Image (cartoon, rainbow, N blue to C red):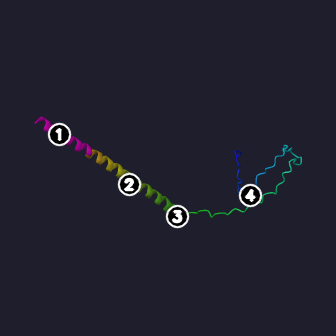
Amino acid sequence: MIQPKIPVNPLPTGLVIPLDQSTTAVEPHHPGAAPACGCHRAPVQPTSRVQLPAVRLTPAGLVAAVAGGAGLVLIVGAVLVSMLLAVAITGASVAVCAVVLRSLLNGQHHR
């Protein structure tokens, strides 16, 4: 119950190799010698990769992509600047209203 169970994960090749649950001692492999542990596995067959076609732009397509990107940057910049300008105008108008109200309220106290 307390011992964790390690799941069997598929390899990128698509072959699923289960974990070896043997409790025998494993001796280290020596170069040039036959493996002493008896862990003989079949060689993994390489799978064929699907090659996606590369995107190739003609000079006219490249110019169109650059112009579209520059136009998008200009439009986004204009929208952001207009929003900043709207916030600044709103803040200035609120400040003017506060000054006018303050002067009106101070004028009533002096009468």
Residue in the picture at 20% in, 42% down? 101
Residue pointed to by mark 2: 79
Q: Please state which amino acid type lies under the numbered disc 3.
A: Gly
Residue pointed to by mark 4: 16
Residues marked 2 and 3 touching at CB (< 8 Å): no
**Hey, which residue is sitting farthest front in the picture?**
1
Residue 104: % across, % down: 16, 41
- What whole-number distance in Å separates the C-alpha atoms at marks 1 and 3? 66 Å
Which segment is the magenta one?
Answer: 94-111
Q: Earlier in the sequence, mark 2 or mark 1?
A: 2
Residue pointed to by mark 3: 61
**Hey, which residue is sitting farthest top in the picture?**
110
- What whole-number distance in Å separates the C-alpha atoms at marks 2 and 4? 54 Å
Q: Is 102 colored magenta in this rendering?
A: yes
Q: In terms of depth relative to the viewer, which is nearer, 48 or 66? A: 48
- What whole-number distance in Å separates the C-alpha atoms at marks 1 and 4? 82 Å
Q: Nearer the viewer, mark 2 or mark 3?
A: 2
Q: Earlier in the sequence, mark 2 or mark 4?
A: 4
59 horizontally vs 34: left or right: left
> Which secondary structure lies at badge 2?
helix
Q: Earlier in the sequence, mark 1 or mark 3?
A: 3
Q: Earlier in the sequence, mark 2 or mark 3?
A: 3
Q: Please state which amino acid type lies under the numbered disc 2.
A: Val
Q: Quadrant of the C terminus?
A: top left
Q: Nearer the viewer, mark 1 or mark 3?
A: 1
Residue pointed to by mark 1: 105
Q: In terms of depth relative to the viewer, which is nearer, 5 or 72? A: 5
Q: Is residue 30 above or below residue 72?
A: above
Q: Residues within 10 Å of mark 2 (few under 14, many from 20)?
A: few
